[in-house]
Image (spheres, helix red, strand yellow):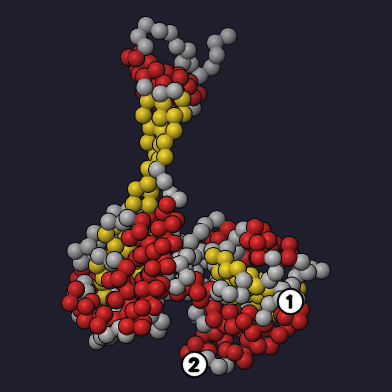
Amino acid sequence: MALEYLKKAEKTSATGEQDVRATVQTILDEIEAGGDAVARQYAARFDKWDGEIVVSADKIAEASAQVPQKLKDDIRFSYDNVRRFAEAQKATIQDTEMEILPGLIAGQKQIPMQAAGCYVPGGRYSHVASAVMTVTTAKVAGVGHVTACSPPRPGVGINPAILYTLDLCGADAVLSLGGVQGVAAMAFGLFGQPASNILVGPGNQFVAEAKRILYGKVGIDMFAGPTESMVIADATADPQIVAWDLVGQAEHGYNSPVWLISLDRTLAEKVAELVPDLIATLPAFNAENAAAAWRDYGEIMLVSSREEAVEVSDRYASEHLQVQAADLDWWLASLSNYGSLFLGEETTVAFGDKAAGPNHVLPTKGAAKYSGGLFVGKYMKTVTWQRSTREASRAVAEATARISRLEGMEAHARTADVRLEKYFPGQNFDLSAVEES
């Protein structure tokens, strides 16, 4: 049978996007021109903050003392898992060299970036996990200096648990700045910190747009949109768990898409029945977000085969993809487009978001078709090098001269000619682009 929608989204991730580019561009331009003073003005305006910008060691220690030991233990558990996984990933990224021709050796070298900027949201939801995911991975990669920023609360400052986490994970400096002003401060190297080579971390639409505009001057992790999640389930799945997993991701925000691909009609109908009731049990703010996301962006799709499920899933290329179905190895081998994959009922997106180990900064809006998420490699440059003996350079120089002349690049060709003349004096070479008749 053809794909059947039991529930179709009324909106897409592009629906109703506010045009914030002009506003963000103005803020970036003013901060770049005015430096620390202008960034402070925006902090006072948007963050309602006029305290210290660079958080002192004493303030971090004071904040850490406020964090309950059990929460510290949980944060360290998350940090240890993320660090170990990042270390394992780094071990797969290696320097290498090979002899292409006798005497011509080429290689690649992995060079960590000198400075990174990590944005950690701190509004309604204090994203301790984002501090773990971004800073830990940068330090494992070998980044020389990591600056983090997070929005301060008026009269209070950055959430103590976030400060504790940033310190635990190795941030070299923490700025009490949110929004565009925080991104700008890290990008331009304000408040005594080095300018960041890369900006990473989730944030609202203003943060995302600031990173988009700055891309090119600095690297970024990805162009991020609202978080999104998909579940593939068959008749073996537990409808209550499937429904909660959808609700759990809809909680992120009013425009966070959640999708179910079901191979079983009874399961799909039961999930459709459960989701509104589960949302109603949440605290008011969470329920408001989840209800809007489910109403406007939620979908339930019924497919007739697992092959069709794979086809649909790969077309959506969801940021998070859960599979609650039989034969998990088949799904792992068959699925291609996703930010992170969660196989089986025993794991879920929230585990990955908070503590399991793989990074939670992931591609959205279809970018999983061509990109993975944040990992140690994002903080490293893979550069190449070569060296050659004079004898090995002969064949390369001859080919280079002829190809360059074919392309009309005479000066290129002569960089080869001059070497052949020096290294092999008195020898004749055919260096024209076209054979003589």
User: Which mark sits nearer the N-terminus, 1 or 2?
Assistant: 1
User: Which SS class for mark 2?
Assistant: loop
Residue 421: percent from left, percent from top: 35, 13
Other residues around mark 2 within 10 Å, as few (<14) / some (14–19) / many (≥20): few
User: Which SS class for mark 1?
Assistant: loop
Residue nearer the viewer, 427 or 346: 346
Q: Is residue 99 left or right of residue 173?
A: right
Residue 168: percent from left, percent from top: 30, 71
Q: Disc 1 marks which amino acid?
A: Ala
Q: In this view, does 23 lie to the left or right of 402?
A: left
Q: Disc 2 marks which amino acid?
A: Pro
Residue 317: percent from left, percent from top: 60, 64
Residue nearer the viewer, 321 or 178: 321
**Residue 226 showing in the rendered view:** no
Q: Which mark is residue 283?
A: 2
Q: Residue 235 carries which label?
A: 1
Badge nearest the viewer, 1 or 2: 1
Q: Is residue 31 above or below residue 97?
A: below
Residue nearer the viewer, 241 or 146: 241
The N terminus sits in image quarter: bottom right
Q: Which mark is residue 328?
A: none
Q: Quadrant of residue 109?
A: top left
